[in-house]
C-alpha cells in the first residue's frame, strides 16, 4: 500500500524507519497529479459575465445621472428672438443700474432727482433724454461751469464740477441706457460702438466740457 493511502496508525505499525519515510515523502512530492478538468472554467465564465454586467450598468447609470454630476443642469429652453432681446436689455439695464449706484448715485441720488442747488436731476432732463451724445461726452470728459436743468441753475461753484468717469465703453453704454429709461425717462438705449465713436472724436480734448460747449454741439436738443 502506498504511504499516501495509509493512516497515521498504519504508518507507525509498518515498521518504516525515518529514512524510508523521508524517501517516501520525497517520492510523493515528485508525483505530478493531473489537474482537475474544467475546474476553472465555470468560475472564469461567472467572472466574465459579472464584469460585462458591471460595464453595461455603469454606462446606463452615467447616461441617466448626467455623467455622475451631483447637480445636473436645468433643461435648456430655446428662447424666441423677442425673448432673447428682452433678456439682453434686462441684463444691460441691470448692469447700468449697478454702475449708477456705485458711480453716480451719491450726487444724483438713487431717485434721479439730484440735490437742489448742487447736483442736477437726471429724471426728466433734456441733458439725459435727448441726444445720447450729450451725456456720453459728459461722462467721458466731465463738465464744469453753470448749466440750467429744468429751469434751475447748477454748477455755480468749482467744487461741484463733474469729473470724467473712468469706465469703459460697455459700462458707459449700460449706465446711459439705464438712466435714459429710469424714473419715467423714455429714451432709446445707446450701444458700445456709439460710445467708442464719441470717445474717438473727443480723444484730443484734455479738459472738461462746459455747458455752452455741449449746447453748441447739440443745439437741436436744447431748442426751446
Image: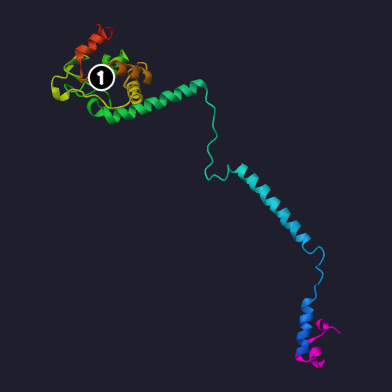
Q: Quadrant of the C terminus?
A: top left
Q: Residue at x 37, y 16 (%)?
A: 188
Q: Is residue 22 visible?
A: yes
Colour basis: rainbow
Quadrant location of residue 172?
Answer: top left
Q: Which residues are magenta?
A: 1-18
Quadrant location of residue 117?
Answer: top left
Q: Is residue 150 above or below residue 55?
A: above
Q: The residue tagged with tag 1: helix, strand or loop? A: helix
Q: Is residue 75 left or right of residue 55?
A: left
Please state the horizontal and vertical placement of residue 58, each as a whole percent of the image: 64, 48
Q: Is residue 160 left or right of residue 7?
A: left
Seen as rendered, the residue at the extreme right is 1
Please state the horizontal and vertical placement of residue 54, each as a whole percent of the image: 67, 51
Q: Is residue 158 left or right of residue 90?
A: left
Q: Residue at x 59, y 44 (%)?
A: 65
* Mark 1 crowd level (few <14, some 14–19, many ≥20, 10 Å Cα): many
Q: Is residue 132 above or below residue 20?
A: above
Please state the horizontal and vertical placement of residue 129, each as a whole percent of the image: 31, 15
Residue 16 belongs to magenta span = yes
Residue 136 belongs to magenta span = no
Q: Which residue is mark 1?
A: 138
The foreground one among 73 and 207 is 207
Q: Residue at x 37, y 28 (%)?
A: 94
The foreground one among 5 and 116 is 5
Q: Quadrant of the N terminus?
A: bottom right
Seen as rendered, the residue at the extreme left is 157
Q: Is residue 191 visible?
A: no
Please state the horizontal and vertical placement of residue 152, each as a whole percent of the image: 18, 16
Q: Is residue 41 above or below residue 117?
A: below
Count of all numbered marks drawn on residues in the image: 1
The foreground one among 29 and 37 is 29
Amino acid at each position: 500500500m502506498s504511504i499516501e493511502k495509509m493512516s497515521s496508525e498504519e504508518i507507525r505499525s509498518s515498521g518504516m524507519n525515518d529514512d524510508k519515510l523521508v524517501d517516501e515523502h520525497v517520492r510523493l512530492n515528485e508525483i505530478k497529479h493531473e489537474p482537475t478538468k474544467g475546474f476553472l472554467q465555470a468560475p472564469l465564465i461567472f467572472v466574465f459575465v459579472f464584469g460585462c454586467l458591471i460595464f453595461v450598468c455603469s454606462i446606463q447609470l452615467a447616461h441617466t445621472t448626467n455623467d455622475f454630476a451631483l447637480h445636473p443642469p436645468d433643461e435648456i429652453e430655446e428662447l424666441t428672438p423677442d425673448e432673447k432681446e428682452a433678456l439682453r436689455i434686462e441684463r444691460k439695464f441691470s448692469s447700468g443700474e449697478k454702475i449708477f449706484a456705485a458711480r453716480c448715485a451719491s450726487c444724483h441720488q438713487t431717485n434721479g432727482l439730484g440735490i437742489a442747488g448742487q447736483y442736477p436731476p437726471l429724471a426728466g432732463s433734456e441733458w439725459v433724454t435727448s441726444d445720447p451724445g450729450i451725456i456720453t461726452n459728459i461722462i467721458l470728459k466731465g463738465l464744469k461751469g453753470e448749466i440750467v436743468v429744468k429751469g434751475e441753475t447748477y454748477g455755480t461753484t468749482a467744487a461741484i464740477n463733474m469729473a470724467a468717469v473712468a469706465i469703459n465703453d460697455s459700462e458707459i453704454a449700460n449706465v446711459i441706457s439705464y438712466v435714459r429709461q429710469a424714473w419715467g425717462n423714455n429714451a432709446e438705449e445707446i450701444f458700445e460702438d456709439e460710445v467708442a465713436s464719441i470717445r474717438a472724436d473727443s480723444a484730443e480734448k484734455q479738459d472738461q466740457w462746459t455747458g455752452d460747449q455741449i449746447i453748441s454741439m447739440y443745439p437741436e436738443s436744447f431748442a426751446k
